[in-house]
Image (cartoon, rainbow, N blue to C red):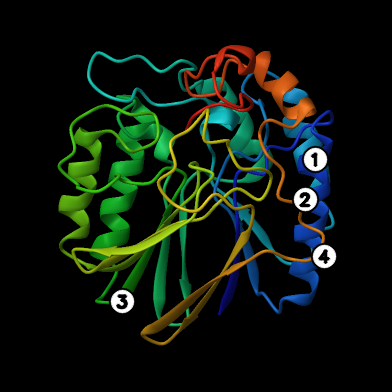
Amino acid sequence: MRILLITDTHLAPEATPCTKNWLAAKAFARRSGSDLTIHLGDITFDGIDNEEQHDFALAACADWPTPLRFIPGNHDVGDNPPGPGVAASQPLDQKELSRYCDMFGNDYWSFDAGGWLVIALDAQLLGSDTPAEAAQWRWLDAQLDGSRGRPIVLLLHKPLFAEDPQEATPHIRYVPKAPRLLLLQRLAKVDLRLVLSGHTHQYLDRVIDGVRHIWVPSAAFFIPDGAQERIGEKVVALGVLDLDGAGHSFDLVCPEGMTQWSGSHPILSEMAAHSRSLNGAPPAHASGGNGGAGDK
């Protein structure tokens, strides 16, 4: 099975650079031979504050050339708290989450793919201490109990951690430590092979404790070094995942027509300056360095 992975598209009527890259991604999807496209979250630029962006994004998806599935990002439904006693700058909004599910489908789900079990989680629920988080844990336990030894791919908007699962410093970029450890305890009992995430606007591919962790970069823009530390490769691209039996392959693709926009682009900088959902980052004009869409 071939799966096209796209993330952090940040669609909005005003975000014309993002829309141009969306159209380039759509053209590539048409010729890629993909069976499915999965969006890893942050569909919208600022949908948590502007519901019209959800409408715009849904309309943009209407003629996508493959089946299309989604998981939410912080720009779509709000964010989980980064750690104990640390509030999210734009907290998870249950009303917006419900609206998201009505428009884009369930926020967590699974399916069989060529002998693999693909599990998608709503990272924004993790650490939220909500009934919705408890429901997701119960659902996940049932999925893992029924995995029957199949290799597992985990999808979620945020990476689990930077370098070490035991990292304790709260950061908007990663799953908070307490739910991260609960998740890893569960996954240690099954055959987890691969974790794919978005959110960071950087590409990174490495194996930690026998599990391959891939950060899929944004298909819209990269964040300048002056506004975000460089951990991986700052590139605008898509991912192509092939699953076959017990094997898999992943390719990073920069398709024809996809521009390497920077978050310092004037349109994106102006939008970022008025956004509350940029993970607590200061407005573009106050971020230092090159400015633009802020840290993740």
* Along the viewing direction, whichever of 56 and 262 lies nearer the viewer: 262
Distance of label 2 from label 3 (alpha carbons): 35 Å
Point 56% across, 43% down: residue? 41
- Mark 3 in CB contact with mark 1 (< 8 angstroms): no
Q: Is residue 185 left or right of residue 148?
A: left
Pointer 2: residues within 10 angstroms few (<14), some, or many (20+)? Answer: many
Circle 4 packing at 10 Å, graded few (<14), some (14-19), many (20+), is: some
Q: CA distance from mark 1 to mark 4?
A: 16 Å
Are there few (<14), some (14-19), or many (20+) residues within 10 Å of tag 3? Answer: some
Gap in Å between the C-alphas at discs 4 and 3? 33 Å
- Say which of marks 1 and 4 sits in front: 1
How far, Cα to Cα, is label 3 from label 1?
40 Å
Residue 26 numbered mark, or none: none
Q: Nearer the viewer, residue 104 or 46?
A: 46
Q: Which residue is mark 1?
A: 17
**Would you say 282 lies left or right of 16 here?**
left
Q: Residues within 10 Å of mark 1 (few under 14, many from 20)?
A: many
Answer above or below: position of 211 versus 287.
below
At numbered mark 3, what does the secondary structure look like: helix, strand or loop?
loop
